[in-house]
Image (cartoon, rainbow, N blue to C red):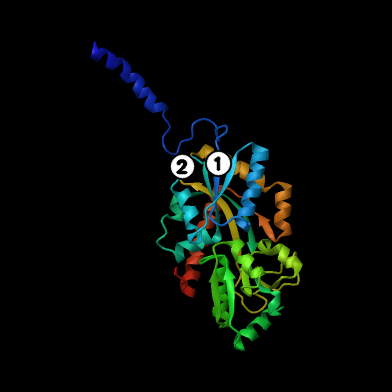
Amino acid sequence: MRRRHVLQILPLAIAGLHLAPVRGQAPGTFPEPGKPIRLVVPFPAGGTSDLRARQVAEHLRQDAGWTVVVDNRPGASGMIGSDLVAKAPADGYALLLGTIGTLAINPAVFPNQPYNVLRDFQPVTQFSRSVSVLLAHKSTGFSTLAQLEAAVRGGSRLACASTGTGTIGHMVGEIYKMRANLDITHVPYKGTAPAVQDFVAGHVPLLYETPSAVWEHLKAGTAVPLAVTSSVRMPQMPSVPTFKELGYADIVFDAWQGVLTTRGVPPVVLEALNREIVKALRSPDVVRSHEEQVNVVVANTPGQFERFIADETRKWASVVKETGVAAG
């Protein structure tokens, strides 16, 4: 009797195994009604990446009906927040706002980081690209790159802030110092918000940032732009020269950011994430806010973004090797 009972239950148990979701498989529709998606920003609240993430999250709420919670996890040059997503279940409910620093530069600066960008993350779409600008606080009296260089060569000891070790601002600063043969102290911060705060307060005289991060301070005259990293002058900042036209031909770089999830998500989930996030990025108000602050919306496919990250990783590995930048 007991044997017959076991035999009757066994087929049901086997059927149940087929019904149970495996890791990386999202049953039914995505996202499940009421289930929140966590968008991890590996920087403090109030910075450019945080504001862009919240703008897109709000569109996903309004237009797609999704619940997206922005989760700021700063620290270790973006590695703390990034690691959370790298090790999350591959179900699409954990997203990462990645940047050129966390995705392309960090692997060379921090070779022992606890994840592999190309192996552990699934790109969803690139948000945008922008330029970096070298800024002087108005108290310095600098209005040109030549004035800055003359001051340093004349004995002035200056410091330049960046949003962290291995960020685009840090790397551009190192390349510029090498090419110009200048001694300027690098001061890394833990994200955009604290770096801009100290710069605006006059605690550090120079800063590398994207224009969008300091737009109000540019308009107010507190931040004085000296040079941009674009190949040609930006129409929103026509009076600001490029490093290239000032004699630094190889200082031509874009800053960029995008959203990724954990490697192994089901194709249907990846397609849904890409479709809705691209739709949000192409909303007129998002495009307008980007363009006003010298950003360009990209909104590409997962495959395009993945190939772009691989290319950027190779490029910045060479730059890091040349400059000798290392974690410290």
**Residue 231, quarter of the rendered image:** bottom right
Q: Tell me what residue is drawn at x 46 percent, y 50 percent.
A: 84
Q: Tell me what residue is drawn at x 57 percent, y 32 percent.
A: 33
Establish if 202 lies above or below 275. Answer: below
Task: Give the image location of residue 227, x and y in percent.
Answer: 67, 73
**Residue 205, quarter of the rendered image:** bottom right
The numbered mark at residue 92 is: none
Closer to the camera in the image, 228 or 159? 159
Closer to the camera in the image, 146 or 154? 154
Crowding at mark 2 (Cα within 10 Å: few <14, some 14-19, many 20+):
many
Crowding at mark 1 (Cα within 10 Å: few <14, some 14-19, many 20+):
some
At numbered mark 1, what does the secondary structure look like: helix, strand or loop? Answer: strand
Q: Tell me what residue is drawn at x 58 percent, y 56 percent.
A: 257
Spatial CA distance of label 2 from label 1 is 12 Å
Q: Tell me what residue is drawn at x 57 percent, y 39 percent.
A: 272
Q: Amino acid at mark 1?
A: Ile
Q: Amino acid at mark 2?
A: Ala
**Residue 215, quarter of the rendered image:** bottom right
Task: Give the image location of residue 94, x and y in percent.
Answer: 51, 44
Q: Residue furthest bottom?
A: 154
Task: Tell me if I can see residue 301 in this picture.
Answer: yes
Q: Nearer the viewer, mark 2 or mark 1?
A: 1
Q: Is residue 177 left or right of residue 142?
A: left
Q: Which residue is mark 1?
A: 37
The numbered mark at residue 90 is: 2
Establish if 141 lies above or below 72. Answer: below
Q: Is residue 326 left or right of residue 98?
A: left
Task: Tell me if I can see residue 298 in this picture.
Answer: no
